[in-house]
Image (cartoon, rainbow, N blue to C red):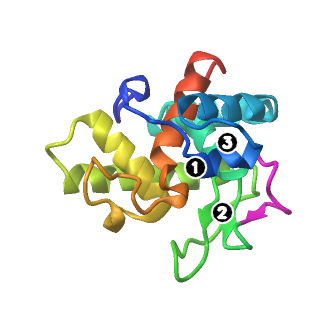
Amino acid sequence: MGYGNIMMVETTGASWQTAQQDRLGYSGVRASHTMAETDAGRMEKYRSKVNTVGGKYGITPALIAAIISRESRAGNTLENGWGDSHNAWGLMQVDVNPHGGGHTARGAWDSEEHLCQATEILVYFIKRIRNKFPGWSSEQQLKGGIAAYNMGDGNVHSYENVDGSTTGGDYSNDVVARAQWYQTNGGF
C-alpha cells in the first residue's frame, strides 16, 4: 500500500529466542511462518476489523495481523486485555507505561478503536523513520518503522542493525515474515 510492499521487505525471520515461545527446534522465516499459522485460527475473529483499519490507514492488513500475532498471539497471551506486566494494552500491545510509550489505552482490548490507535502509532513511526532516513527505500523505511513500533525511533540507528535494540533482537524481521505469511496464506 502507501508505505512500501511488505512482500518486498527483506527478512531473516524470528530469532532462536522468539522461536522458543512455541518450543520450535528452528528459527528464521520458517519459525515466523509457523507461529503465524498457529495464530491463524484465533486471528479469524479479527479479520473484518483488521481489514477495515488497514484500509483506513493505508497499511496492509497482513502487517496488522502480523503485529497482533507477535504482540499477543492473537489475544492468546493477554489477561483481561493486558500484557507485558500490565504495561501494554490490547491485541497490538499499546505501551501505556509512563516511562515507555506513555499512551492512554483507547477502546476495548480487541476493538476497532484499539486497532486504530495502534495503527496510528505504527504510521507515526514509519513517518519518523522516513524523515530520519530519507535515503532508505520505502521497504527499508517500512521495516525501520516496524522496529520503531517496538522500541522507538531513537533506537533505530542503521538498517543493517535495525533490530539491534528490539525485543528478541528480531522484532521487525519476525513481524515482516509473519506479515508475508498472512498475506500469502492467511488471505489478509
Residue visible at 47% across and 56% down in the picture: 149
Say above or below: 5 vs 141. Answer: above
Residue 72: in sight, yes or no? yes
Specify whether residue 174 is painted magenta: no
Label at residue 116: 1
Quarter of the figure with residue 181: top right
Label at residue 163: none
The front one of 134 and 161 is 161
Magenta stretch in the rendered image: 73-83
Q: Residues within 10 Å of mark 2 (few under 14, many from 20)?
A: some
Specify whether residue 78 is painted magenta: yes
Q: Who comes first in sequence, dot 3 or dot 2?
A: 3
Residue 74: in sight, yes or no? no
Marks 1 & 2, CB-CB < 8 Å contact: yes
Q: Secondary structure at mark 3?
A: helix
The percent coordinates of residue 86 (x first, y second) are 73, 73
Say whether residue 21 is left or right of residue 182: right
The front one of 52 and 126 is 126
The residue that label 2 is drawn on is 106
Q: Secondary structure at mark 2?
A: loop
The percent coordinates of residue 64 (x first, y second) are 57, 39
Q: Main secondary structure of the magenta part?
A: loop
The percent coordinates of residue 154 (x first, y second) are 32, 68
Say whether residue 111 is left or right of residue 124: right
Say whether residue 26 is left or right of residue 108: left
The percent coordinates of residue 9 (x first, y second) are 37, 30
Residue type of the residue flagged with mark 1? Cys
Label at residue 69: 3
